[in-house]
Amino acid sequence: MTVLAFCRKVLVAFRPYWVLSSVVLVGVLIEMALTTTIPLSFKYLIDTGIGQRDRGALMTVLGGLCAAVVTVGVVGVGRDYLYARVVTASLNDLRLRMFRHLQGLSADYYARTRTGDILARFSTDISAVEHALSIAIGWAVLPLLQAVLGSILLVLVDWQLAVVAALVFPLVVFGPRFVAPRATRASYRRKEDEARTLTDVEESTTSQMVVKAFGVEERFEEQFRHSTGALFDSSVRVGFLTAVLERSAVIGILVVQVLVMGVGILRVYDGALSLGSLVAFQALFVLLSTSLGYVAEFVPHLVKATGGMQRIEELLAELPTIAEDQEAAELPRLSRELRFSGVSFGYRPDSAPSLHDVSFTLPAHTSAAVVGTSGSGKSTLVNLLARLYDPGAGSITFDGVDVRRATIRSLRDQLGLVFQDSVLFSGTVAENIRVGRPGATDAQVREAVRAVDLHGFVSGLPDGYQTVVGPGGRQLSGGQRQRLAIARVLVRDPAVLVLDEATSALDPASDRAIQATIEEQARTRTLLVITHRLVQIRTLDRIFVLDAGRLVEQGSHHELLALGGVYRRLWSKQVGLAAEPDVALTEEGSGMGRP
């Protein structure tokens, strides 16, 4: 992105606030006119007021200067307030646009993008843009206007000396024009390095249990040292190039200032120019030089903002791979069957497919399980069902309607998904439950929590259901988080209840209680269980067995045992190892399934 492109983006962002922006511009023009004409008054103060001993002219000019100072102060304060509102509103719009865009991106974007890189766009990149915009009036817009008006006044005072003064413009322009593109690229690279450093901090902070358990503190420290080393190199390059940007203009201004002063003094000495005119010209040129100096100092901030905006635009340019069809219709509540037909899918084009030609039918209001070894494609099947990804081949239908022809919201509203990793938000217990159903009443929230056998625990918390669970629910145990996640789904009243290793974090007693709850809930809905604990699914209507992404067996528990295939081997391995006690409990009626 070029600096000019950045400026165009800013103008577009300001467009919704054109009324306030227009008032700000009027204020800038008033301030510019008054501050630029003050140096011109020196000609009349010296040549007329002092030279001709004209007290009236002297007092008139001095009074006008006092009025100008007061006016500039009042107008400047009002302009600053209004401009602050415009900048803040525009940046808030940009943040909201970025956040809304992130919500619409597909799961594959989050799978390939570092969290720290996303956060950096909302922190360092936005901050760079905000800083440049906040000082743009005083360091760019007003100085540029003053430079334009000052140049006109210089010609009016003495056009010959103005020709000499005009040498300042090529010296100010060509240096930054040569260095600015390099500085922009360096600034972009620095922001990339900042994002990488932020990612290292984020990963180390959120993974402290693993870091300490495996004693890899030194490894993470070395990785962070490498990231900060790269950040050091890019920061030095940015600092050097931005300093060159500023210094190239300042040196040119100083050279021309000395030249103008020398030529002007010689013209006064020869009688070609009055002393008042020289003082006025020199004051105007100092104002012109100072204005250009401000612009030169602003350019490095503009370069950093341009790099930040480029990264923001890269985020906004990301397109979701899961797009809703323009003619998508609302999907009615499942009433007949859920069907996978020849579904194949791979997370990456260059890797082996996670699912290959998978076909099965799950009638409504029945229960089923998907089992298989790790990596067989069980969770991938859930991701496709929720349309977090689309199949590479085949289709998934609800009552014969391809989910790709339905609105995404109407599809996901029917699903109650409980994942193995329970994600809670940094709000209260009640707020986390209402994520599943924002309009749920207090009674419905409590009913859902009672269903997962957690009402007694929640009621005993200091603030009951209004207790804050902390970021990620870290103030709760893993089992408590999992039960709240299940309650969050139950309050949703989904047509299809999907449990992806949902009880893996529970102790045996809580597990049996939850299984009973799920069994009761499954009476009026379709149940799909993803699990590796086969003793929990013995009584389900149907079991689908995946192996290396293929559906190799399906049937009831007893039918699959009789086949003597993959399921029987899995069952024999579990019963022969750790599942023996659970089998006895299951036979007493604690297994998941239809009563």
Image (tube, helix red, strand yellow):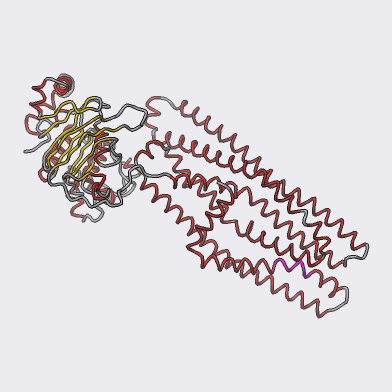
Q: Residue at x 67, y 66 (%)?
A: 32
Q: Is residue 403 left or right of residue 245?
A: left
Q: Residue at x 53, y 29 (%)?
A: 226
Residue lying at the far bottom in this picture: please name it. 56
* Residue 39 colored in magenta in the image: yes
Q: Is residue 464 visible?
A: no
Per the picture, the main secondary structure of the magenta-coloured stretch is: helix
Image quadrant where residue 504 sits:
top left
Between 92 and 145, the one nearer to me in the picture: 145
Count of residue discs: 0
Q: Is residue 128 above or below residue 39?
A: above
Q: Is residue 584 above or below residue 21?
A: above
Q: Residue at x 23, y 39 (%)?
A: 395
Q: Is residue 114 left or right of residue 156?
A: left
Q: Is residue 551 above or below residue 291?
A: above
Residue 121, horizontal then vertical, whole percent: 47, 45
Between 578 and 367, the one nearer to me in the picture: 367
Between 386 and 587, the one nearer to me in the picture: 386
Q: Is residue 545 visible?
A: yes
Residue 1, horizontal then vertical, whole percent: 55, 46
Residue 325, horizontal then vertical, whole percent: 30, 49
* Residue 551 colored in magenta in the image: no
Q: Residue at x 31, y 32 (%)?
A: 346
Image quadrant where residue 457 sits:
top left
Residue 363, horizontal then vertical, whole percent: 12, 40
User: What stretch of residues is rendered in magenta?
Assistant: 35-41
